Image (cartoon, rainbow, N blue to C red):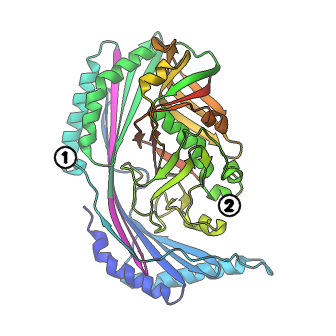
Amino acid sequence: MFNQLDSLKPALRSLVAALREKYAYASVLATEQRFRSWRVSRGGVGIGSSGMNCGNGFVIRVFDDMGCAEYSLNAFDEGMIPGVIEELSRRIAAEKAAVPAGICPMAFTLPDDSPAFIKKEAEYKVDPEALGDEAILSLLNRIREKGLETEGVLDVMLNASYSAERKVFISENRELDETHMWTNAAAVALAMRGQEVKNYYRPYSLLGGAELFDRVEHDIGEITSCVLELCKAEPMIPGEYDCVCDPDTTGMIVHEAFGHGVEMDMFVKDRALAKNFIGEYVASPLVTMHDSAKVAQCATWSFDDEGSLTGDTVIIDKGILKRGMCDSLSAMRLGVAPTGNGRRESYERKAYTRMTNTYFEAGDSTREEMIASVKYGFLLENPSSGMEDPKNWGIQCMVNIAREIKDGKLTGRIFSPIVLTGYVPDLLKSVSMMGSEIALSGSGYCGKGYKEWVKVSDGGPYMKARIRLG
């Protein structure tokens, strides 16, 4: 799929060896990426070739007694090695000169450079690139036409994209090489209610290829039915209710409630309340939360952008907050091991602590049992957005559909739109049932810092909790 980096590996190894003669640690991250997107709607068709995280480039990193210095560039060959070393030396000298007199630099431990070798290729059934633009647009148009057969639907819009990326990380003792492909799709159905246009949006994601489009085609009838239901939706009466969350809504709560709040670069900056609650109950004993690269979703990599190996981090274990997730620099400052969560938007951006695939573990209840247990409340579906306040543990999320439950049965009434709010520990401590199967979705991106964006996924099982709605 990618060949350019194969020919550059000897030069990258030479660069690391030359830097190691001067610095205690040196590494290089090389990235190569391809991206393509397609859309069809009443307005026509479109094809795009640029998106988030796109770009081929290199990040060179060294450590000395001052800490870490980086240099990124979009092209590299062996003849550039002297210039790269000179530029890094200049940057480190400038950093040292900027330290006020009498201030001792913070002591740094070096990144883990124990021997590791990875060579991993992307897995997929249908290569979008091999399928080609014409075939993909024809498929999306066929799905759209099928959706328009539903009476009352104004339009159906379909978007799809894929990204194939190769990352190579080289240090003195590590050579990590992985190719990754994800595919996204989204269907939006439109219908009229009086003078108001209602829309229903359903996203899809897959660590794989164009085989994802089969799922969109399978669901298109349900998608158009949902938008017609929204035309009959009632406004929500604010209050606190027993709620059953679908896996997507559970995932949004995971991401917003305890995602950013346990990114440990926020611990370093003292911007996260979670820092003070390690070892304490913050959720129901039914709640176990993971950030994991051991599940097959869009944010799964075998190593992060700092060369740390990824794994499965248990953040909450049966209600007890165990630890956060961290990049290597935050780990050094906090005296803990990195979790493989150092991620960059691109070679042009710094690494932050970022989530990967974040989810709640399954329990032993069924969706039907949860609904049957509700005297009066709602089944929450189709979340659209959310935000949190890590310093105060507040959460605010938008959900598109709340289906009324009365005496353990769905009544057929739906309410929309819904604002879900609350204090995170109160919400999570109220969890009383967890579904027996989990589902994750990675159709979106997560922003942080100066709005750097990275691919993430989240999810979990159906979940019953007491939630404030408005």
- Residue at x-position 56% and y-position 36%: 386
Which residue of the protein is positioned furthest toward the bottom in this rendering? 21
Percent from the top left, x then y, of residue 122? 28, 57
**Magenta stretch: helix, strand or loop mostly:** strand
Q: Is 130 above or below relative to 110?
A: above
Query: What is the distance, in whole Å, between disc 1 and disc 2 at their CAs?
Result: 47 Å
Residue position marked by numbered label 2 in the rendering = 268
Residue position marked by numbered label 1 in the rendering = 131
Seen in the image, is 33 located left or right of residue 434?
left
For mark 1, give the secondary structure: helix
Seen in the image, is 404 located left or right of residue 297?
right
Is residue 155 visible in the rendered image? The answer is no
For badge 2, the amino acid type reads Val
Tell me the quadrant of the picture where the C terminus can be found.
top right
For badge 1, the amino acid type reads Leu
- Residue at x-position 52% and y-position 37%: 252
Seen in the image, is 364 located left or right of residue 315?
left
